[in-house]
Image (cartoon, helix red, strand yellow):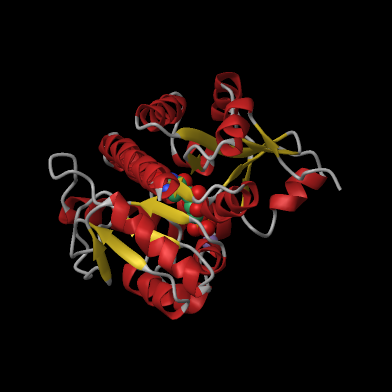
Amino acid sequence: MPQPYQCSESVRAALDVGRPVVALESTIITHGMPWPQNVEMARGVEALIRAEGAEPATIAVLGGELRIGLSDGDLVALAQTTDAMKLSRADLAFATAMGRTGSTTVAATMIAAALAGIGTFATGGIGGVHRGAESSFDVSADLEELARTPVIVVCAGAKAILDLHKTFEVLETKGVPVVGFGTDELPSFWSRGSGIPAPLRLDSPQAIAAFQRSREAIGLEGGMLIANPLAPELEIDRETVAAWIEAALADAETEGVRGKSVTPFLLKRIFELSGGRSLEANIELVRSNARLAAQIAVATARS
Ligand code: PSU
Ligand code: MN
C-alpha cells in the first residue's frame, strides 16, 4: 500500500530529523472565517509557528490527496473554495477515495497528524456537545477523537455556542485531560472565563510536554486538551457574547439548520451580529494558540 498521505517537503524534512512540527486544521479556513481574513489568518499563524522554531503543517484533502503541509498557493486556493467538504472521522476517507477537496475538522486533523507522527496541534475551539443535545444528539466527533488519538490539542476552550458543562462532562467521562494553561478557570473561546473550573492547571510548555510523556509511559491512549485563554485586552466579555449567541441560535432554529452546518452557521451569524468583532477575537485566539502549540512542540522535541 502506498502511504495514504503526502507531506510537503518542509514538513517531511522537519519530521525526518525530529524537528518540532505543529499541525493546523483547515475547517477554520473554509467554514470558520470569511475570505480574505481566512487566508491572512492561515499565513499569519504559519509565520508565528516558524518564529517559535517549529514547522507548521496545515492539513487538508486536495483533489483526493491527504496533504500535510500546504504551499502558499494551496492555502490561497483552499481559502477561496466555496464547496469544500467539512471532513471528520466519518468522511475523511470518502474524500480521498472520491477525489474530493475538503477541509479537516479537529477530529480529522488529529487523525492525519497522528498518522504522520505529529503530536501537537493548534486550533481555535474544539467541537463539543451542542445546546439541546438531549433531544438533537448533536455531539461533535472531536470529543471521541480526543479520547483515542494521541495528539495535544491547544485551543481556547470549546466554543461558547455549545453547552460547555456537558462538553467538559463528556471529556471527563472519556478520560481526556483538560488543562487550563496559566488559569484555574476554563476559557470560553471569545471570553477568558466560563464559570467552569479547569480540572487541571499547568503553567509552562515544559510541564505540558512532561505530562504527555507520563501519559504515554503509563500507556494511556488519547490526546489532551490545553485550554489557553485569550489575553485580557483582547477578550470580549461574556454578557456581550451571550447576547450574540442567543440571537444566532434563534436564527438557526428559525432556519432549521441541522448537523454539520450548525457550527459554520452560528459562527457566521455571530460575525455579522458583532460587526466583525467576534472574528477579530477569533483570529487573535488562534494566533495565541499557535504560539503556545509551537512552544509545546519545541519542549517535546527537546525532552
Ligand atoms: N473553531 C473555529 N472555527 C471552526 C471550528 C473550530 O474557530 O470552524 C471547526 C473545527 O474544525 C471543529 C469543528 O472541529 O468546527 C466542529 O464541528 P462539529 O461541531 O460539526 O463537529
Ligand atoms: Mn455536530
286 to the left or right of 92:
left
Residue sitting nearer the eye, 284 or 217: 217
Residue sitting nearer the eye, 201 or 285: 201
Instruction: Using the image, determine if residue 221 lies above or below residue 13.
Output: below
222 to the left or right of 47:
right
Q: Give the image quarter of residue 184.
A: bottom left
Instruction: Using the image, determine if residue 52 lies above or below residue 235.
Output: above
Q: Residue furthest left?
A: 233
In the rendered image, residue 57, in percent from the top left (x then y), is placed at 53, 36
Q: Residue furthest right?
A: 1
Would residue 117 be seen by someone viewing this image from the given angle?
yes
Q: Residue at x 37, y 55 (%)?
A: 209
In the rendered image, residue 169, in percent from the top left (x then y), is placed at 37, 77
In the rendered image, residue 134, in percent from the top left (x then y), is placed at 46, 79
110 to the left or right of 204:
right
Residue sitting nearer the eye, 278 or 244: 278
Q: How many numbered dots are placed on residues in this image? A: 0
Q: Residue at x 39, y 68 (%)?
A: 131
Q: Residue at x 26, y 49 (%)?
A: 190
2 to the left or right of 207:
right
Q: Residue at x 23, y 46 (%)?
A: 230
In the rendered image, residue 260, in percent from the top left (x then y), is placed at 56, 55
Instruction: Using the image, determine if residue 51 lies above or below residue 112.
Output: above
Q: Give the image quarter of residue 249.
A: bottom left
Would residue 69 be seen by someone viewing this image from the given angle?
no
Q: Residue furthest top?
A: 73
Q: Give the image quarter of residue 297.
A: top left
